[in-house]
Image (spheres, helix red, strand yellow):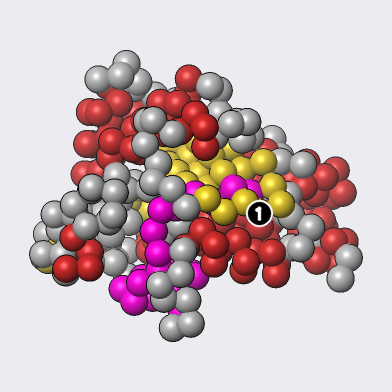
Amino acid sequence: MAIKGRFERAEIMIGEEGMNILRKSRVTVCGLGGVGSFAAEALCRGGIGNITLIDFDDICATNMNRQLHALETTVGMPKATVMAERMRLINRDAVITPIKEFISSENIGRLLTPPPDFLVDGIDHFTSKAALIAWCLEHGVPVVSSMGAAARRDPSKIRVADISESHGCRMARSLRKILRQQGITTGVDVVYSTEEFDRNCAREPSAEETENGFGIKKRVTLGSLSFIPPIFGMIMAGIVINRLLGKV
């Protein structure tokens, strides 16, 4: 099928010039969980022509309630590889590059060279998240970052704002504190929820969840519903596409 047919409905909205802008754009998605997997696919279906997918993890059964790539047939497989294969079936002409690595301050420069036109941050490790955002701001890479999507139930409480204006989100509050220590107080858009964090939606991690293979131990497992993380991801994809098109 020709690209024109594949993206005909989008082209009605944004025109041939808009589709060409998206086809030539390079976007990196970091973290392919419930947020990142949906953001990545929406970007691919939106016509982004070059997408890099970065995630260190393999799919497990507990991902199946909210992560796009998680199926009975994919459990145990790398998230980045499975998403790349799925996205190539959506747009065979797109360049999809999967990378199975844990993002840290030591490898960010290598993973993001050459710098993308936009970065989607869907990771949840605070130190890595802050390092990723700081690198993007230092190198002039626009970034949209996901805050806490777990332990929430109400889609109507999801918001978008500069991180300096976010409120009611524990993750955003903690991240602001870490970024301030690096002299960063503004300049990154975040998707977050103002819904009060439900402290009852947490339990001790299972044995398979405790250690991620990179020396990072999980202290608690938060509950998460099927619809909140995907909405976060879709909103992030919308921000990226509209910004690339100069619409917002």
* Residue at image mark 1: 96
Magenta residues span 51-71
- Residue 25 in the figure: left or right of residue 185: right
138 displayed left or right of 124: right
Tell how many labels.
Answer: 1
For this rendering, which residue is in front, 108 or 127? 108
Residue 45 falls in which quadrant of the image? Answer: bottom right
Numbered disc 1: secondary structure: strand
> Which is more toward the observer, 228 or 29?
29
Who's the residue at 67% across and 41% down the image?
26
Across and down, in percent, residue 195 comes to 26, 54
Q: Is residue 96 above or below residue 109?
A: below
Q: Quadrant of the C terminus?
A: top right
**Residue appearing at x 34%, y 32% in the figure:** 130
Give the main secondary structure of the magenta stretch.
loop
Q: Is residue 52 magenta?
A: yes
In the rendered image, residue 47 lying in the magenta stretch gets the answer no
- Picture quarter containing residue 121? top left
Quadrant location of the N terminus?
Answer: bottom right
Residue at the image position 40 percent from the left and 41 percent from the top: 103
The residue most toward the top is: 183
Q: Is residue 178 above or below residue 194?
A: above
Amino acid type, label 1: Ile
Residue at 35%, 72% (x, y): give it.
60
In the rendering, at what x and y percent does residue 166 appear?
32, 37
Is residue 248 at all visible to an observer of this figure?
no
